[in-house]
Amino acid sequence: MVNSEYLDVFLDESQEHLQAINDNLLKLEQAPDDISIVGEVFRSAHTLKGMAATMGFEDLAHLTHNMENVLDLIRNHKLQATSEVLDVVFAAVDDLEAMVTDIAGGGTGSHDVSEVVAQLERIEKGEPTIAATAEAPVKEEKQVTSGEEVLSETYDEFERTVLQQSFEQDYTAYQVKVTLDENAMLKAARVFMVFEVLEQIGEIIKSSPPAEELEEEKFDQDFLVTVITKIEAEEIKKRILKVSEITNVHVQQIDQNKLKLSHVEEEEQASPSAAAEQAAKPEQTSKPAVKEAASSQPKKAASEHNKTIRVNIERLDVLMNLFEELVIDRGRLEQIASDLKNNELNETVERMSRISGDLQEIILNMRMMPVEQVFNRFPRMVRSLSKDLNKKVNLEIIGAETELDRTIIDEIGDPLVHLLRNSIDHGIETPDKRRQLGKPEEGTVRLKAYHSGNNVYIEIEDDGAGIDREKVLNKALTNGVISEEDAEKLTDQQVFGLLFASGFSTAEKITDVSGRGVGLDVVRNTFESLGGVVTVNSELGKGSVFSIQLPLTLSIIDVMLVELQDEKYAIPLSSIVETAIVNKQDVYSAHNQKVIDFRGKVVPLVFLKDIFQVPGEQTDDEFYSLVIVHKGEKVAGLVVDSLIGQHDIVLKSLGNYLKDVFAISGATILGNGQVALIVDSNALIK
């Protein structure tokens, strides 16, 4: 039984150690002779093994022990840290991460690691890894053709009983391995559709990972389902492949005799494995004692400088919700104090406002997390992708310590993956082509984050081929995205913006990485839903820069309050360029659109009273009150009745019933108890 008291600590520390192992292995690949890096990896692996053994996760401890043996050989100069050796160690780390994810989801952490362990043992014995990996597919192919493939799934007593009963009733049991497209955005939806297909033709007995993890998308690209049915294997495969974004389906029949044999073998192996564990314990306990004694002094020094506690994020969310209510009440108090004009009350309210302002800053800082948490996963992805595409790519990360609100951090991972994959696949050329162009063989992708005002900017820059303006325009004309008349007037920025159109792709052939026209439109929509803006700059032959502007936080924001008749609206300050009052005589008409010449630039006017259908009579004022807003390079003037002033407000959702209201992103409660709607200026600028 896992001790739940320590499980959370174990999971947190395991993830930290696995991240440290990943980071240091990437460094080791760049500097294979630096033994200090091997020492760091070894220490993290050793600590992880000790924690896993203490918590009773034997598979995790066993695999880490094998990985540790290989690292020990590298550390003692008995083995070179070649790319082939590190590929196997990375595969072991992937399995360790899968086990920790399983434990976090309430599983036992058991995982079939026989293949990786076998490869690690081959390395220990000095056998070539390339031959070993080449043998594996051949061996597997023989097993499939002869119908003698070893079961890769384990079943408990209840599941075995169900399978045995299904055999008696003339049903056939299959293991179905389904692989999703790497670019699939809604993996859980695809899993649901596959389950629906299988439930129409039979009954699902088990899935790996479990259904809860599949729903939460806690898996890579493939999952395994055990199903009983009377349908043929080929028919199952055809039906599943009809679901979109499925790249491969492997259906394997479960042999009744094999199922019985595997059960007997498990029982026979139970006692020897226990004895082996007992024999291994003295070795495991003696080594950590020496390590701990050697490193006790630095640990003590570190603890003095770094005093932290772990707080469940749900508690911070509750604290934030309570503070949001306090901000609303603070606004109400300020309104009352202003109306009553009582000096003592005014002084008390001002003091409370200052204290609550400081408290607001502290709470918002507590919710801030470095973007490093997202960026850390990219070096491994870039390494794998560059190998798949036969390209040489160096990923430079700058400003990983830049902080963002946790709610934004949670959302930006997948869109950034799309942009990075896009830069490597479309941007960076092959080594041969780069040599011909006089560029270094290794391309560079620079991922940079930095603060500017109340925003965080994330830039993805590459020194690749850049964007071919003519190619993008021709593709847009072919797809009917724009007309030939419009094409002649478009600036470079507007042409590059066409890349974000739905279904648009300049790839000449569809691959696992790109070409389906899925991705960049989703990327833009995701960032815009977070109040962000995506812009593209590119120079043909030199490279491209994708720039994302994001707000620091989504919960408490600065706004400009405006009035339309008796209704109040809030416009986020992050979208505002400036406010202005213009004479009606300075307003012109162009292409059925009211515009003004503002600071030498033609700015279209948007009448919010018409957009939101505000009831009331039109006023005959000589002047328009304007709020000039921007979306990237584009600007527009929002026409309002009057400007009230700047306020801190709490952003509240409109709920599920009103989630698709045009140009409204939420609401807030003002000091006088009135509700003000928050304007989404991005939706108003085409």
Image (tube, rainbow, N blue to C red):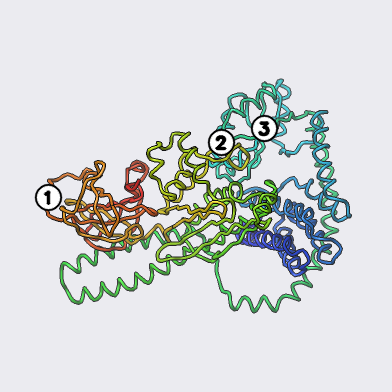
Give the vertical position of 273 relative to 281 (above or below): above
Can residue 1 be seen from the camera position used here?
no
Classify 10 Å Cα crowding around label 2: few (below 14), some (14-19), many (20 and above): many
Taking the image as shown, residue 83 lies to the left or right of residue 183, namely right
Mark 1 and mark 3 lie on one chain; the one further toward the N terminus is 3
Residue at 70% of width from left, 79% of height from top? 297
Q: Is residue 131 left or right of residue 89?
A: right
The residue tagged with tag 2: helix, strand or loop?
Answer: helix
The three-letter code of the residue at mark 1 reads: Thr
Find residue 74 and report its image quarter. bottom right
Helix, strand or loop for disc 1: loop
Q: Residue farthest to the left?
A: 620
Q: Nearer the viewer, mark 1 or mark 2?
A: 1
Q: Which quarter of the figure has residue 140?
A: top right
Q: Earlier in the sequence, mark 1 or mark 2?
A: 2
Q: Which residue is mark 2?
A: 190
Percent coordinates x, y for residue 410 in the rendering: 51, 54
Q: 220 and 127: which one is in front?
A: 127
| Distance CA(mark 1)–CA(mark 2) | 54 Å
Horizontal and vertical percent position of residue 146 = 83, 28
Identify residue type, mark 2.
Arg
Out of 126 and 289, give the one closest to the viewer.
126
Q: Position of residue 186 (x, y in %)?
A: 53, 40
One can see residue 456 in this view: yes
Indicate whether 304 appears above or below 261: below
- How many residues crowd mark 3 within 10 Å: few (<14), some (14–19), many (20+)? some
Task: Tell me which label, 2 or 3, sits earlier in the chain.
Answer: 2
* Residue that numbered label 1 is attached to: 619
Foreground mark, 1 or 3, reads 1
Marks 2/3 in contact by CB < 8 Å: the verdict is no
| Residue designated by label 3 | 249
Question: Residue sitting at 71 percent across and 60 percent down?
Answer: 25
